[in-house]
């Protein structure tokens, strides 16, 4: 299906706001670039998460999957591998796609792909200037106890699906 | 923590775009109203979902938890009960909070609370004008098989957490 009309009403660096007409009704939508995230396990079986300040939630630090934007012309798995290496130094390993997600489909157009990567090898981090990202490694038997602390939707989906895949 | 400055750069019906300065860096953020969603089980133990067209994902129909906006001055559980009754007719039952979620914390300020409601009683639906929402009731032994079809983040988080709560 396609909208009858479409107008960009605000243009940003990370996302645009568009107003589209569908079946005679106007919809305000946020159009965000594609993104990719990874449920990452190192060779010791530890889940590797990142903790960073999030201005959108009042400047609190959230515990999240390593993730980032997919560049133009790049595919999702390449973006996920690149972001994982930059933020954590981890590379290599065995990869599979866990799920394509819609973070908030009522108004947000942000296709997000979540991968599972296991047996990752250590390497050097390459954080962007000004990126302040703390690495958190969670031993296999402590992942369950961590669940109540998670607020980020992609992280909860990824970790819950990964626990099922690895258990079964 | 608070931003050093804040400017509303686009104002919509459902969300605004704001530019805030945090520690000297400008952030583009989408500020959305609070929302609430329900993992709803009827008295036969069936999971009750809604299927509706979503313009943000190209006009495809997604299977989701009943959900909606929290009105000004309303609390989350009242909003969830109201939306559930409007969309499905279900009311009463036993309620508990499952999780407070951030759907996309990199740029979206949308506090979303997911509830679990069980033993719900049947009643009449009260759909808003123009709302086209199909009810889908999933028997208890078919919920697992449904998981691969789910793309909406709040629905996946809610259903996966509810399966754990109900199993344990």
Image (cartoon, coloured by chain):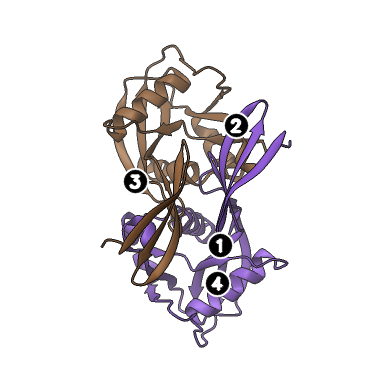
Chain colours: A brown, B purple
Q: CA distance from mark 4 to mark 3?
A: 28 Å
In this rendered view, identify the residue nearer to me: A29 or A38. Answer: A29
Q: Which residue is mark 3?
A: A99
Q: Which residue is mark 1?
A: B13
Location of residue A73 with respect to B44 vertically, above or below: above
Q: Earlier in the sequence, mark 1 or mark 2?
A: 1
Spatial CA span between label 4 and label 1: 33 Å
Furthest residue toward bottom: B124
Q: Residues within 10 Å of mark 2 (few under 14, many from 20)?
A: some
Circle 4: element type = strand
| Chain holding disc 1 | B
Q: Nearer the viewer, residue A23 or A131?
A: A23
Q: Residues within 10 Å of mark 3 (few under 14, many from 20)?
A: some
The subunit carrying tag 3 is A
Real-space CA distance between mark 3 and mark 2, rounded to the nearest whole angstrom:
32 Å
Are dots 4 and 3 in contact, CB under 8 Å? no
Indicate the chain on which mark 2 is placed.
B
Cβ atoms at labels 3 and 2 below 8 Å apart: no
* Residue at left offset 55%, top offset 22%: A131
Circle 2 sits in a helix, a strand or a loop, which is it? strand
Q: Is residue A144 left or right of residue B72?
A: left
Q: How many angstroms separate mark 1 from mark 3 (CA)?
A: 31 Å
Mark 2 and mark 4 in contact? Answer it, CB < 8 Å.
no
Mark 1 is surrounded, within 10 Å at the Cα level, by few (under 14), some (14 to 19) or many (20 or more) other residues, namely few
């Amino acid at each position: 299906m396609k909208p009858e009309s479409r107008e960009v009403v605000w243009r940003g660096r990370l996302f645009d706001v568009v107003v589209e007409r569908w079946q005679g009704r106007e919809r305000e939508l946020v159009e965000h670039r594609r993104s990719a995230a990874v449920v990452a396990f190192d060779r010791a079986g530890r889940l590797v998460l990142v903790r960073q300040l999030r201005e959108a939630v009042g400047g609190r630090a959230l515990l999240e999957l390593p993730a980032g934007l997919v560049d133009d012309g790049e595919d999702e798995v390449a973006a996920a591998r690149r972001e994982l290496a930059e933020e954590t130094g981890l590379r290599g390993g065995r990869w599979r796609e866990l799920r394509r997600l819609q973070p908030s489909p009522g108004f947000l157009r942000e296709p997000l792909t979540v991968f599972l990567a296991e047996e990752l090898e250590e390497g050097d981090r390459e954080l962007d200037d000004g990126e302040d990202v703390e690495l958190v490694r969670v031993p296999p038997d402590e992942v369950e106890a961590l669940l109540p602390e998670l607020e980020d939707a992609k992280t909860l989906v990824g970790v819950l699906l990964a626990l099922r895949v690895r258990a079964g």
